Image: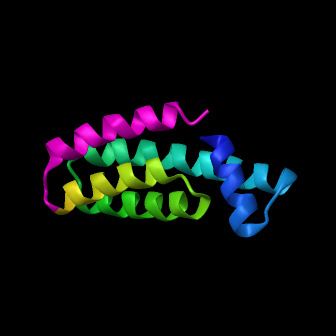
Amino acid sequence: MKSAILDHLRENFEITGDNAVMVLDTYCQTLERHVRELGAAINDEDILKIRAVTHSMMGCSSNVGAISILKRAGEINQAAHRRDLSAARRSYALLCEEVRNLD
């Protein structure tokens, strides 16, 4: 997926080389923080926090073209909107798998 993100940055924003790598690294660091925050919010059953974190995650992922992560975060956001924590937990597990497979 990282190569797809680099392609997206090049094709859509003309960001290449070290600058593209810097954007990708920043995204990955931000994503890791969001995943931790989201896991804590789900454990705490904090619907507002789940929605806030997934909203941020969707924005970042959209910007870099990480579509699968964007979609998974959207699923969690919608589950939280419906107050369906079981669905949020299931989608969170799948999101974690997506993040692990980022390489």
**Residue 89 part of the magenta segment:** yes
Going 39% across and 64% down the picture, which residue do you hit?
55
- Look at the image and name its color scheme: rainbow
Going 30% across and 61% down the picture, which residue do you hit?
51
Q: Please state, as top left, top right, bottom left or bottom right, where the N terminus lies in the image.
A: top right
- Where 13 falls versus 1 (above or below)? below
The foreground one among 58 and 66 is: 66
Q: Position of residue 45 (x, y in %)?
A: 20, 49
**Residue 90 part of the magenta segment:** yes
The foreground one among 24 and 33 is: 24
The foreground one among 11 and 15 is: 11
Q: Please state, as top left, top right, bottom left or bottom right, where the C terminus lies in the image.
A: top right
Q: Position of residue 16 (x, y in %)?
A: 82, 57
Indicate left or right for 7 with 73 as reference: right
- Where 15 falls versus 91 (above or below)? below
State which quadrant residue 80 falls in.
bottom left
Res 43 visible: no
Magenta part of the chain: 82-103
The rendered magenta stretch, by its main secondary structure, is classed as helix
Q: Residue furthest front?
A: 11
Going 57% across and 57% down the picture, which residue do you hit?
65
Q: Position of residue 84 (x, y in %)?
A: 13, 51
